[in-house]
Image (spheres, grey):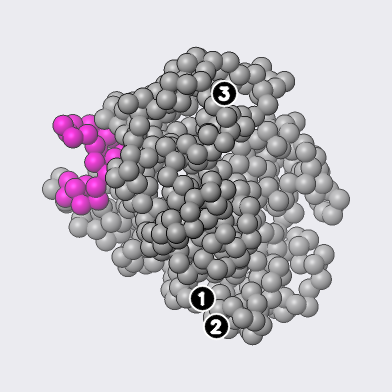
Amino acid sequence: MELIKTENLSFKYKNTNNFLFQNVNLSINKGDFVAVLGRSSSGKTTFLKQFKSFLVPEGDRSGNILLNGQKLNSIPDQIQNRKIYYMSQEFNAQYIMKKTIDEITFGMEYMDIKYTDIKIRLAEICNILNIGNVLNKDISSLSGGQKQLIRLASAIILKPDIIIMDEPLSQLDPLTSKTFIDVMDKINKDFSITILLSSNSLKYIYKSIEKIFLIDDNTSKIHDINKYNMPLHAKNNEYLLNSLPIQCQIYIKNSIQSPDGISSDIKKVRKYLSENFKNNIVPKKDQIKSATEKNKILNIQNIWFKYDIHSNDILKNLSMDVYKGEIISLVGNNGCGKSTLLQMICKINLPYVGKIIYNDIPLNKYKNSELFLNNISFLPQYSPVLLTEDKVLDNLNSVKNYSKNVDDALIQKVCKQLKITSLLNSNVNKLSMGEKQLIALAKLILTSPKLLLLDEPTINLDYLQKENLKNVLNDIVQNGTSILIASHDLDFCAEISNRCGLIFQGEIVKLTNTKDFFLNNYFYTTPSRLISQDISDNIITNQEVLNLCCK
């Protein structure tokens, strides 16, 4: 049964010449699980907002959207709110209440649902998502991933016809991402709740989706591609191919045909590799050596931290060193303390026990003006907070106010490296989250930091932007800068890092060279490692496994 239909839908922003999408005719049936895929700035968020009337941005729009055969703009907002739940990409912007439990139940109270029914639904959702331990916490104290789970709970509990989600996995660790999708899969299949979500990657959602809407930003078209037709399209579309799980890429690049379509099942692909490529030789790569202790730039000694005297410790007796010219990535589940650690290194918070020493001087001895000028720069998860001006160029020019070494030539150089030169005259508010993230990073790079802290630097980036980011970060390191990354993106960490560490229960339980880290882990490792472990003890990245088995 057709739930949503678009009829010649077109949209472009005010005072712009090009349509983001034009004459789009698509349909979504009740119970479908659909992903919207496209490059950063292709219009994924704008497209999703078309399906809730009061969210449609200011611009030129034509065509119709039908919900159960009725024009969407003729349906009152109150009815739309009951039938359509929208989860924004900006996870900090959608909360109404202070306490987690009040946020989850707010929608039901607004709809006058009985208290007994609210309590039953709340108990079910908390058990499904395992969020009972945060019910009485302030939302502001939760990690980005925990906030996403609270938003999902707020959606499911209302039992809408369709849940629309903009980049819902961006703040989740790998294990939580799988749990999240398993829950979405269950409510989709068991209760016929339609799912429409956007993503820069199909890595975690491929097994659940039935089709994708692929936005072609070159032609303003949106292609409706059935899951079983993806191999044909992916062979001729590099972006789509690299958005698929590595398991699927192997099948497609080797032109394997299957009546059931390509598989993302780890076990099946591992068996295929074992049967066909066991004798292939995988050259051993030299592990990149970390700097010696003489080049230590950061020394963290047995730090403890909690947000208030009555709360539990977030960091417990944590110690680590960072050396000049290396990249360290820290991984761990949502709420383990990765972001908190980075915030402490730049004095947003201070430990109540232990020391942080930067360049042989205790951190608390630095004035902020000394610490952040050509020393430490921090890219937070929500990077737009660094963009204080409306125009992109004005944001970058503002660095000149406190850094004498920044001039127009340097700004142009950094923008060229990050491939954002075309955005210099744009309004920040009109850009995608990925573009905002790159502009914020450019602003930090201009300060020439000796230590660059990056909190989830890839969450809003598409495949091509990630590839370019790796090159940019490697160039920065060559000039002596050290980089400390907190990330859920294991593939990126495996490709970029000298060392990787795992944070668990407030401590770094493992910090070692990247190869050893991913080769010896069972769960916190890459899909490439999992599918190749029967034929090689040396593969951890996508490119390594593709070099092994693809012609």
Q: Are marks 3 and 2 in contact (CB under 8 Å)?
A: no
In the foreground, 35 or 105? 105
Spatial CA span between label 1 and label 3: 50 Å
Spatial CA span between label 1 and label 2: 8 Å
Kind of residue sitting beneath label 2: Asn
On the rendered structure, is 470 left or right of 178?
A: right
User: On residue 317, which mark appears?
Assistant: 2
Q: Are marks 1 and 2 in contact (CB under 8 Å)?
A: yes
In the foreground, 168 or 113? 113
In the image, what residue occupies the spot 41% across and 59% down?
A: 120
Query: Pointer 1: what residue?
Result: 506
Decide: few, some or many residues near mark 3? Use Cα within 10 Å; few <14, some 14-19, many ≥20: some
On the rendered structure, is 235 left or right of 42?
A: left
The residue stretch that appears in magenta: 247-272
Residue 45 appears anywhere in the view = no
Kind of residue sitting beneath label 1: Gly
Residue 354 appears anywhere in the view = yes
In the image, what residue occupies the spot 56% across and 22% down?
A: 74
Decide: few, some or many residues near mark 2? Use Cα within 10 Å; few <14, some 14-19, many ≥20: some
Query: Pointer 3: what residue?
Result: 73
Kind of residue sitting beneath label 3: Asn
Q: Earlier in the sequence, mark 1 or mark 2?
A: 2
